Image (spheres, grey):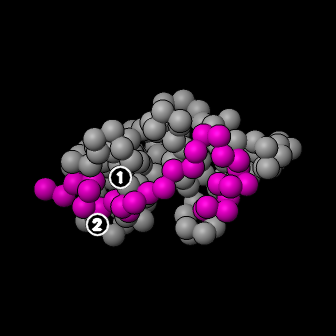
Amino acid sequence: MTTARDIMNAGAQCIGENQTLEDAAKMMRDMGVGALPICGNDGKLHGILTDRDIVVKALATGKDLTTCTAGELAQGQVTWVDADTDVDTIVDKMGSEQVKRLPVIQDHQLVGMITEADLARHLDEKDLSRFVERVFSRP
């Protein structure tokens, strides 16, 4: 059985909830990623910050990237999976939640992220098609 641990990008780094969006943009640039998990002072996952969030929710609305924090953009419930979650469950969860990035948690700690690209590399054609149909379809 293939699990989240088998397909995730290990060693995901968090942006702290009190760090600025400028810090987040630089981290994304340096790491070559388009999203960062937002972790709180309590060590828990508080959200996901994407490069699109920075542009649409901050820049386009006139927020100052040097003072606006990642925590200010964290919204709603965070969807995540345990490291031992099987791939079928991952595809179903990403599809039902319509998310393209999924944090992986083990022992209450962030251990990785699963992205669309990870699924494309590890799923067979049928499962990948099911994922694409669910995530990219409009309700």
The residue at the point 79 percent across, 44 percent down is: 67
- Viewed as shown, does residue 87 lie left or right of 66? left
Q: Nearer the viewer, residue 54 or 123?
A: 54
Label of residue 122 in the image: 2
Q: Residue furthest right?
A: 62
- Helix, strand or loop status at disc 2: helix
Which residue is pictured at 58% across the width and 45% down the height?
16
Residue 111: image tag: 1
State the residue lying farthest toward the top.
76
Residue 72 is one of the magenta-drawn residues: no
> How far apart are the alpha carbons under marks 2 and 1?
19 Å
Q: Which residues are magenta?
A: 1-28
Q: Position of residue 132 (x, y in %)?
A: 41, 55
Q: Is residue 75 found left or right of 93 in the rendered image?
A: right
Q: Nearer the viewer, residue 66 or 78?
A: 66
Q: Residue at x 65, y 40 (%)?
A: 18
Question: In what element is the residue under mark 1?
Answer: strand
Tell me the kind of residue under disc 1.
Answer: Val
Q: Please, what is the three-letter code of the amino acid marked with disc 2?
A: His
Q: Are marks 2 and 1 in contact (CB under 8 Å)?
A: no
Which dot marks residue 126? Answer: none
Quadrant position of residue 32: bottom right
Residue 74 in view (yes/no): yes
Q: Is 3 part of what is drawn in magenta?
A: yes
Q: Nearer the viewer, residue 19 or 73?
A: 19
Picture layout, residue 13 above or below residue 67: below
Question: Across the whole image, how many numbered discs are drawn on residues?
Answer: 2
Residue 3 placed where, x, y %? 22, 54
